[in-house]
Image: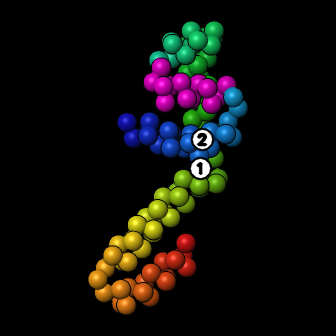
Amino acid sequence: MEKIVKVAQLFDIYGPLLNEKQRDVINSYYNEDLSLQEIADNTQRSKQAISDMINRSVEKLFEFEDELSLFETKQNLKDRLFLIKELMDDSNYTQAKDEITRLIEKI
């Protein structure tokens, strides 16, 4: 299940970098939850060809993340912003001000 979620998240970020056929197959399999056979029937390809295309496309998504780290950067930013929000909600804002400034500079 974890891999499915990760692929879907990477697809949201890097999907436009795949070609149209790769996007369609990944979208059909991971987002529309179609089986390999259903995708094969819809595209007039063999089930093995669809499986190979999915595997290559998923590998590409992970390669993009390894090179560009956009997903990791987004997660780190989200974590830091959440921490800033917690600090701002703190009743003792004056003591938290230096910590907030430091975190914002990291972002």
> Quick one: label 2, few (<14), some, or many (20+) residues within 10 Å?
many
The image quadrant of residue 82 is: bottom left
Which region shows up in magenta? 21-34
Measure how far apart labels 1 and 2 are at the Cα level: 6 Å
The image quadrant of residue 21 is: top right
Q: Amino acid at mark 2?
A: Leu
Name the quarter where the N terminus is drawn: top left
- Where is residue 30 shown, x and y percent of the image? 49, 30
- Where is residue 58 shown, x and y percent of the image? 57, 35
**Residue 79, disc:** none
Residue in the image at 55% along x and 72% along y: 107
The colour scheme used to paint the residues is rainbow
Residue in the image at 50% along x and 64% along y: 77
**What is the secondary structure assignment of the residue under circle 2?**
helix
Tag 1 residue: 65
Tag 2 residue: 61
